[in-house]
Amino acid sequence: MHQLTLAEIARGLADKKFSSEELTKVLLARIAQLDPQLNSFISLTEDLALQQAKAADARRANGESGALLGAPIAHKDLFCTLGIRTSCGSKMLDNFKAPYDATVVAKLAAAGAVTLGKTNMDEFAMGSANESSYYGAVKNPWNLEHVPGGSSGGSAAAVAARLLPAATATDTGGSIRQPAAFTNLTGLKPTYGRVSRWGMIAYASSLDQGGPLARTAEDCAILLQGMAGFDPKDSTCIDEPVPDYSASLNGSLQGLRIGVPKEYFGAGLDPRIAELIHNSVKELEKLGAVVKEISLPNMQHAIPAYYVIAPAEASSNLSRFDGVRFGYRCENPKDLTDLYKRSRGEGFGPEVQRRIMVGAYALSAGYYDAYYLKAQKIRRLVKNDFMAAFNEVDIILGPTTPNPAWKLGAKNSDPVAAYLEDVYTITANLAGLPGLSMPAGFVDGLPVGVQLLAPYFQEGRLLNVAHQYQLNTDWHTRTPTGF
């Protein structure tokens, strides 16, 4: 049963081949057996899962149906879940039990999804490797000596290892798409505002977006259907109708205009990945797509702009964690200043402290115009490049990452080297565009992803292209040895 996709589970439950309770017990046993190798979960919610599974079975017995009714999933551990630890991968929130459900959690629970647990992540979603978690690094099931990508590496590793069919994740600068590429999954970052951020612990508020991680585009369509939609509790959530994503999967690609930016194929890209990307282009051409070279001239400025804007917003968002109201508090503070300093110094890890300091510096009175304001102007230039490109093409295609997954610890002494791995993904966050990564092959036994970008609210187009590609390739069906 653990090899079933979300779509296959929905069909199996509808045909009464198995119950949600049976499936949930199988997957919980599999997590207990295999996750010690991966460290992909922070918390397991066995009692809640079995309770939800029984309720889903009862709803089906009463005539209800739905693709997510009885389907097992997990949540990245920054989505608040009522009465369950929501740690954000940090010592700061190790003792925090959320007093409410995030909108995404509530929507999926209402659809009948079964929550198996909360997945490991880079601390406060800051990282590209899932090595900054207070609970230890997550391992890549394709090679346990390598990173699974971050910050949603726990969700990615768990799905790739067949511990569950799909999981929620978030993407601030590539944190859904990059781990999807590193673990042979399909991952979708929706348009900014498509999925509610209410109850999702913030890293950078103008960049964060929740989305699905699964093995296929079809499964991502099912999970996104349950996550997307307007939420009046989130002022950044957009009141835009949610289409039926599954209904558009089988559209023809005849005449689809695909743009391939020339800037994507510079010196930093592993030539073996470049070859796999060109192979995926040829596959889409066989399906009727028309490919042309385009230019995104301001892409070179995206990383420095992102690493000013994101830390600036993080320094503001994380100021609430001060040892006073909730979360970690230091022992025996001498006074209020000592309470603040030691609670934050002891509660935050080095990567979070680094980004808070960078952000506070960029926002300080003497440097705001020189750094933060200039970064926001570059952000507008990046967006304008995409708007011009989408006048010529329907989607943009390129690599998700410049390299395959690196070894655990390989970039720990050089944070900038890890930041550069986000070069292809962060532009979509700066512009607020939807982006998808799908499996495109292997380099040295490690998965490689191809990234698709589309205009605002065209998630259905991305899923359609990915689904048609997956009907004609088998990369996404490969399973890591031992799992």
Image: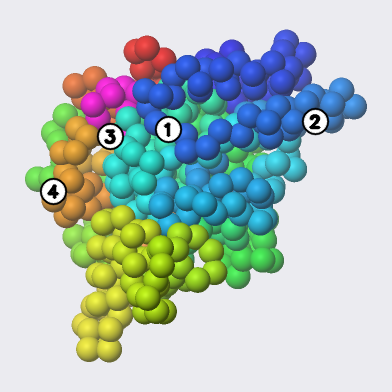
- Mark 3 surroundings within 10 Å by alpha-carbon count, few (fewer than 14), some (14 through 19), many (20 or more): many
Q: Amino acid at mark 1?
A: Ser
Task: Give the CA separation, mark 2 to mark 1.
Answer: 27 Å
Residue 277 in the image, given as x and y percentages of width and height: 26, 33
**Residue 145 belongs to magenta span:** yes
Reading the chain from its start, which is encountered first: label 3 or label 2?
Answer: 2
Residue at figure coordinates x 34%, y 54% from the top left: 126
Task: Give the CA separation, mark 3 to mark 1.
Answer: 12 Å
Q: Which residues are magenta?
A: 140-148
State the scheme by which the image is colored: rainbow
Reading the chain from its start, which is encountered first: label 3 or label 1?
Answer: 1
Reading the chain from its start, which is encountered first: label 4 or label 3?
Answer: 3
Front label number (4 vs 3): 4
Task: Give the CA separation, mark 3 to mark 2.
Answer: 37 Å
Where residue 55 is drawn, which disc sits there? 2
Where residue 147 is drawn, which disc sits there? 3
Reading the chain from its start, which is encountered first: label 2 or label 1?
Answer: 1
Residue 437 in the image, given as x and y percentages of width and height: 39, 38
Return the residue at label 4.
413
Secondary structure at numbered mark 4? loop
Specify the principal SS of the magenta part: loop
**Residue 472 belongs to magenta span:** no
Secondary structure at numbered mark 3? loop
Vertical side of 37 occupied by 379: above or below: below
Reading the chain from its start, which is encountered first: label 2 or label 4?
Answer: 2
The answer to which quarter of the image holds residue 377 is bottom left
Residue 194 in the image, given as x and y percentages of width and height: 57, 56
Residue at figure coordinates x 74%, y 17% from the top left: 19
Residue at figure coordinates x 67%, y 42% from the top left: 108
Return the residue at label 1.
40
